[in-house]
Image: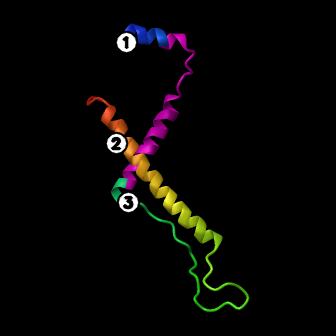
Amino acid sequence: MGKSDKLAIQLAFDILPIDETETRRRVEEYLEVVRIYRQIGFVRRQAALTASPEPRYHGSTNAISRTTENIAVWNTDREVELERQSMLLDLAMGRLKKAE
């Protein structure tokens, strides 16, 4: 497909204008997140309180709270998401020309 064919196809669609400043801000934010992940690694959230091993006669002993569950799920999901973002960035950068 030649350059003129691509231009004709682009003109056939009503393409919305792109907000370049917002696009640039989001791309830079994405690059910064991946850069920090690659340099530092993943910083996990931690619960502020720890479970007490003492028996609790009015409740269950060593039970974890919803907060602890939520933190564990967030840690797992966030690490997977950062790893995926890093992989996608590598794929995108590999497709760019050397000059870009």
Q: Residue at x 71, y 91 (%)?
A: 57
Q: Nearer the viewer, mark 3 or mark 1?
A: 1
Q: Residue at x 59, y 86 (%)?
A: 52
Q: Find out whether residue 94 is within the magenta segment.
A: no
Q: Residue at x 56, y 80 (%)?
A: 50
Q: Which residues are magenta?
A: 10-37
Residue 11: x percent and y percent?
51, 10
Q: Amino acid at mark 3?
A: Gly
Spatial CA distance of label 3 from label 1 is: 43 Å
Residue highlighted by disc 1: 1
Q: Nearer the viewer, mark 3 or mark 2?
A: 2
Spatial CA distance of label 2 from label 1 is: 27 Å
Disc 3 crowd rating (10 Å Cα; few below 14, some 14-19, many 20+) is few
Q: Nearer the viewer, mark 2 or mark 1?
A: 1
Residue highlighted by disc 2: 90
Residue 98: x percent and y percent?
26, 31
Quadrant (top left/top right/bottom left/bottom right) for the C terminus: top left
Residue highlighted by disc 3: 41
* In this picture, residue 15 sits left or right of residue 61: left
Q: Which mark is residue 25?
A: none
Residue 53: x percent and y percent?
57, 89
Q: In terms of sequence position, does the residue under pointer 2 or pointer 1 come before the other?
A: 1
Q: In terms of sequence position, does the residue under pointer 3 or pointer 2 come before the other?
A: 3
Q: Residue at x 56, y 75 (%)?
A: 48
Compared to residue 86, the image places residue 98 above or below, namely above
Q: Amino acid at mark 1?
A: Met
Compared to residue 41, the image places residue 8 above or below, namely above
